[in-house]
Image: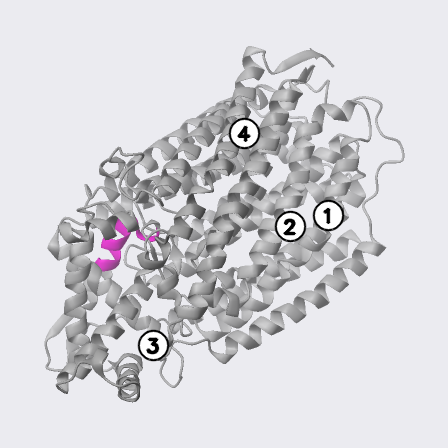
Amino acid sequence: MTTKRLWLGLALVMGISFAVLIFFGTDIYRQAPPIPNAVLSASGDTLFTGQEIKDGQNVWQSIGGQTVGSIWGHGAYIAPDWTADYLHRESLLVLDASATKDGKTYQRLPAEEQALYRERMKQILRKNTYDASSSTIVYPDERAAAFRQLSVYYSKLFMYDPSFKSLREHYAIPEGTIKDTARMHKMAAFFAWASWVCVAERPGGTVSYTNNWPGDELVGNTPAAALHLWSGFSVLLLLACVALLILYHVRNKEEAPALLPATDPLRNMQPTPSMRATLKYVWIVSLLILVQMMAGIITAHYGVEGSAFYGFPLDKYLPQSISRSWHVQLAIFWIATSWLATGLYIAPAVSGYEPPYQKLGVNILFGALLVVVLGSLTGQWLGVMQKLGLIDNFLWGHQGYEYIELGRVWQILLLGGLIIWLVLMLRALLPALRKKDESRHLLTLFVIASIAIAVFYAAGLMYGRQTHLAVAEYWRWWVVHLWVEGFFEVFATVVAAFLFCRLGLLEIRSATTAVLFSTIVFLAGGILGTFHHIYFSATPIAVLALGATFSALEIVPLVLIGFEAYQHYTLSKSTEWIKAYKWPIYCFISICFWNFLGAGIFGFAINPPIALYYIQGLNTTAVHGHAALFGVYGILGIGLMLFVLRGLYPHKHWNDKLIGAAFWCINIGLLVMVTVSMLPIGIMQAIASIQHGYWYARSAEFMQSGTLQTLRWLRVPGDILLATGETLLVIFVIGLKTGWSLKNER
């Protein structure tokens, strides 16, 4: 296939995909569940107002939001999903109230009469009583009473009631998480509305706004027919596209050069001042890896000791919501920093041109990144510790949305940093862009990916402090899926191709064709695959259909991952001098493994709608998250970092034992952690969700059972190996400066 046709194909894929993504995004705006002006009881009393729902959403965000349990299945895993928890408790209270109203006790009734009350309860909960003309929702008396009781229940849980100490321990929620009764009432109102969305049927339909999620037969939430239909279709489409990809691969292969270079083509390249200035980025990446590791250890331990760290009352100073936020945010920071440093290093290397004041720009960007990292982490702590007002928390503290926890001001500053990075990249690449040689196509794709990295983070600014949750989730996944999982992957693919071409191991023409085709295939599924994250986030059924269809296509490129791994391994053995690049290339081989396992097997296991209906937000999601985010993107960041270090320390061999031990400990530790502990917990939760309902799979009753506690402790061996590997990696990086990681001359 010609390069011109591939570029046309890429333009069509991106143009059509984004048009569809935006069109159905507007549909999410139009069909979002209503936030009423008021929720009234049947007798006319105001239970809570629409403004209290919005303020309650902000209160929930201020305590950590999606880092303290979850809403609509998105969030953390120790505490419950609050919508599932509220809905199930509400159903039991309505049952009891209905029977009591008739002078009966529900638990003492015969099965036939209990069934009648269950049907009456379903009608009370599932009937959509929203009146558009008055913008009100009316609760029958039984449901109004349930709200008042649950408001008291959640107040006791999140505030100071001593009788809830044990439950707070199970949920890793510190005493006094919310200190103000007015704030607590507002958060209870938000929980009530978010749960109403899960059970109230859309006008003219028979399924709820969340497509009957969470699963709970007691309230009539069972999988809709569309979930089965589109799940089956996604599997069939996957099989068909895999066959087409294999056919293409058989007919088109990357070509190795007819004659490999006798010596390392990059060994004698003199790093420019700005290239050498990227070394400090590597040092800060190493530091962030260690801090992120410690935050992960603390977060994992909260799963077995919810208020302390081996007896020390750590939750008074560093609650689980903060340690988890830091763990996730620092992972994104260090991975992104390693990739940005690689770009800054490669741009002058590709063009052979050092623009004036490029080093100064690299240093200014470094300082800006430090300010954003330290400022955002401090703001998150202040927000969760309830030291900021709701508006200040949104601006400077904790937004409550997973992966973009940092406050809005820090978001804007980070976007500014990315734009500075883009400018530094473009000014260094301009001479190379002006050339009309074979590398211009690969270079153009590199520039497009760089622009996308800077621009697409801006999607996180498209929602505001009190934006509807369904709309905020849509834009959040633009950042998480398209920015992190999408264009960073394209960027990394192009960088890897550049490196291998510069090393003389691949022909530039065949590498360009391969990268363009891979990008087309990846983005064909990846852009609209964004929708698979929001099947149950109060989105229309068309979003579910598109998400199921195109997320299946995301798996297609991974079927040939074994060949890619073998190709990288062959390259690592092709010449004697290539051994100097052994560990960066081994990182690429490792990425292939984790791409297949983490993104492929673990990813597709939770992608079909019928699967995700039962297991969204369970530990199966954590399995996919750790294996894909760290296994693919983290190790890719490490591999790119090692390539940069090889260029900055070109003349000596490395201490293979040290970096080798780090590499194997990281990979084996991650595999043990995921498969021995997290995966079995996720499978047991999935079984519980299918058999008893989603609420039960997330409940303290189930999660604190002896078997699950044992499985949580079984992640310790994997954690130790992973932590050892990361520590050895940092020691190796330091050793390049001190000399203990360097050996004899090459």
Whole-angstrom CA distance, mark 3 to mark 2, is 38 Å
Residue 262 versus residue 219 in the image, above or below: above
Q: Which image quadrant for residue 185?
A: bottom left
Q: Which residue is mark 2?
A: 596
Relative vertical location of residue 75 with respect to residue 470 in this rendering, above or below: above
Which comes before the other along the chain, label 1 or label 2?
1
Mark pair 4, 1: CA separation? 25 Å
Q: Earlier in the sequence, mark 1 or mark 3?
A: 3
Q: Nearer the viewer, residue 57 or 160?
A: 160
The mark total stands at: 4
Q: Secondary structure at mark 4?
A: helix
The residue under label 2 is which amino acid type? Phe
First reached walking from the N terminus: tag 3 or tag 2: 3
| SS at circle 3 | helix
Residue 33 seen from this side? no
Between 79 and 581, the residue placed more toward the observer is: 79
The foreground one among 404 and 676 is: 676
Earlier-in-chain disc, 4 versus 1? 1
**In the figure, is residue 95 to the left or right of 263?**
left
Q: In the drawing, does residue 737 fall left or right of residue 470?
A: right
Instruction: Check whether the beta carbons of the residues at disc 1 and disc 2 lie within 8 A of each other.
Output: yes
Type of the residue with mark 4: Gly
| Residue 227 x, y percent position in the rendering | 51, 74
Q: Which mark is residue 218?
A: 3
User: Does the magenta run of residues contain 476?
Assistant: no
For label 4, the residue is 725
For marks 1 and 2, give the CA distance.
8 Å
Q: Which residues are magenta?
A: 55-66
